Image (cartoon, rainbow, N blue to C red):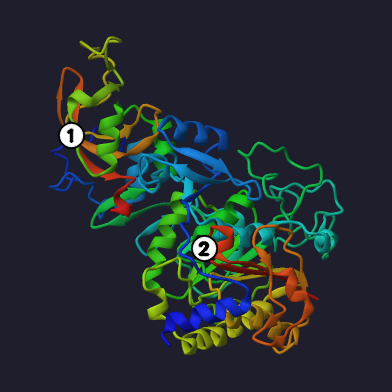
Amino acid sequence: MTHKDIFIKRYAQLGGSCPLASIPDVIRVNTLRINEQELVKRLSKKGVVLRKIKELSCAYRVVKSPFSVGAATEHLLGYYYVQNEAAQYPVEVLMRQTQDGERWRAEDEGQTVDGGRLTQDDGRKMVDGRRQTAEDTCVLLQPNQNAKHCDTVLPTTHYLPPTVLDMCASPGGKTTQLADLMNNKGIIIALEKKKERIERLKTNLERQGVHNAILYHTDASNVKKLGITFDKVLLDAPCSGNYTQEDGWFEKRTLSQVNKNAAEQKILLSAALSVLKKGGTLVYSTCSLEPEENELVIDWLLKQSAGHRVSILDTDISAGEAGLTTVFGKTLHKDLKKCRRFWPSKTGTEGFFIAKVMKV
Amino acid sequence: MVDGGRWTVDDSMQMADGSMRTASANKNPAEEFMQYFGVSLPSDMKRLGTSYYSPSKDVLQLQQRIAQEPVFLGSRLGKEIKGVFMPSVELLQEATQTTDKKIVVNEKAAWLFVCGRDIFAENVLSAVGSRQSADGGRWTVDDRRIAIKQGDYVLILNEQEECLGYGLVKTLRDGKPSVKNVYDVGMDLR
């Protein structure tokens, strides 16, 4: 039995399949740089046909283009980022307000998103002198409602900007997406372990007009050494990837590599929770289809194996399908159905897995 | 010169290949670029490696609580590679608002420029103090107004007046400059 046979058999057991899906290019409009409609108009004039993805803030499928969308002046100027559809959901889920997250809504209607009413000492004190509480901390920003160039108006309730951790940041697609949805307010601490990936990340942060990121060249498993805690954490973990991303993927991967990755992912997840504030939210994602790197990692977390009390939140997206609650005959925690799993053959995107977790 | 005077090809601040020399006069290349194109210097400029940053107060406050040295800090103004200052897209756009040393080129030349090519005079649509007639024919030059001379650095703008980089004026005839590419926004991706 070849590696490919093994993986395909596993996918069949999990309810998936793997016909070679044709995945369309997707662009994400960078509203820090340009108005969404203006960009669509400009690209249309050049013969690019776009179709808006309704569930995402500013994403468009490229239906037709006379040139590679990565080779346009608008791309070089940072007006958009070429980013797979599925890869855009983790940040949307992290920044989206869910029912579970309602208690994070700021009660002080007078707060401004520019942080003007925070004192300068530690960014966590209210102007009236009292310490900021979980109820004051407004860590949730609504996609489309805060980006200055998006068409939707600001909500009447304003939010204080959060401190967000992006644990494995390169090449920066999700970091720049975070900055866009945060409208460059608050702070993003981005970490990258591999030196050879740092330059590209820096270039993308600059090109996309990110002003609120601080990048460290460090292993995310050491994040506690930074000495600060976060309102939100994005752990888009290093993983085995999936067969839509490279030719010959099946021949290059083994189950032992999958298990090795899973062990590393648990270490990172544990580190992430150690710096997440109580009541804060974490999104864990991978572009792997293997349950050992996805549902089984979250199941491990729910059994408090990492020493943290957590609950799984709804992702509040309809894309993909519910996470698996039975894997190869093993029954997992029922809340895993709140996670989302993207089978390329069903979604037309690359493979993905997303879980949203709250520290309690 | 970066002291507010003229910066010519004979100037000692220029390298043989036309790029801005960066290790002189106690000024860093980011400051030299900004002063040359009339951009106000930020009060809080930071250098990390070969990059220059202008972090916000909030970014600085948080960074100061962390012992480790960052590799990116807030807003990057640009970086220096082999003596060439590579300004950020944002700094280029800001400079466009503060200088007369800029030219607008046609669509074809704009695309070739971001692919690393030089600008030929026939593709220049306008420069401050000189312009092509509306019918695309004769150029008129007002010597009293012309802001660009041979040896100057100029910003290269497309027809939407977005800055795509900068270059060095090699020749100037009847107000039409030919420009050697020094830096363009496509350089990082090549």
Chain containing mark 2: A
- Type of amino acid at the residue the image marks with label 1: Gly
**Residue B118: percent from the left, percent from the top?**
19, 37
* Frontmost residue, A269 versus B76: A269
Numbered label attached to residue A101: none
Q: How many marks?
A: 2
Viewer-side label of 1, 2: 2
Q: Is residue B45 visible?
A: no
* Frontmost residue, A190 versus B98: A190
At x 33%, y 43%, the residue is B33
Quadrant in the picture for the N terminus of chain A: bottom left
* Frontmost residue, B100 versus A336: A336
- Type of amino acid at the residue the image marks with label 2: Glu
User: Which residue lies under the disc numbered 1?
Assistant: B151
Task: State whether residue A31 is above or below residue A326.
Answer: above
Other residues around mark 1 within 10 Å, as few (<14) / some (14–19) / many (≥20): many
**Residue A312: percent from the left, percent from the top?**
76, 73
Chain containing mark 1: B
Is residue B42 toward the left or the right of residue B146 in the image?
right
Numbered label attached to residue A350: 2
Could you confirm whether marks 1 and 2 are on the same chain?
A: no
Is residue B127 toward the left or the right of residue A11 in the image?
left
Quadrant in the picture for the C terminus of chain A: bottom right
Q: Is residue B161 visible?
A: yes
Is residue A316 toward the left or the right of residue A91 in the image?
right
* Frontmost residue, A128 versus A351: A351
Other residues around mark 2 within 10 Å, as few (<14) / some (14–19) / many (≥20): many
Quarter of the image where one finds residue A326: bottom right
Q: Secondary structure at mark 2?
A: loop
Task: State whether residue A280 is above or below residue A328.
Answer: above
Could you give the CA–CA distance between mark 1 and mark 2, rounded to whole angstroms?
51 Å
Q: Secondary structure at mark 1?
A: loop
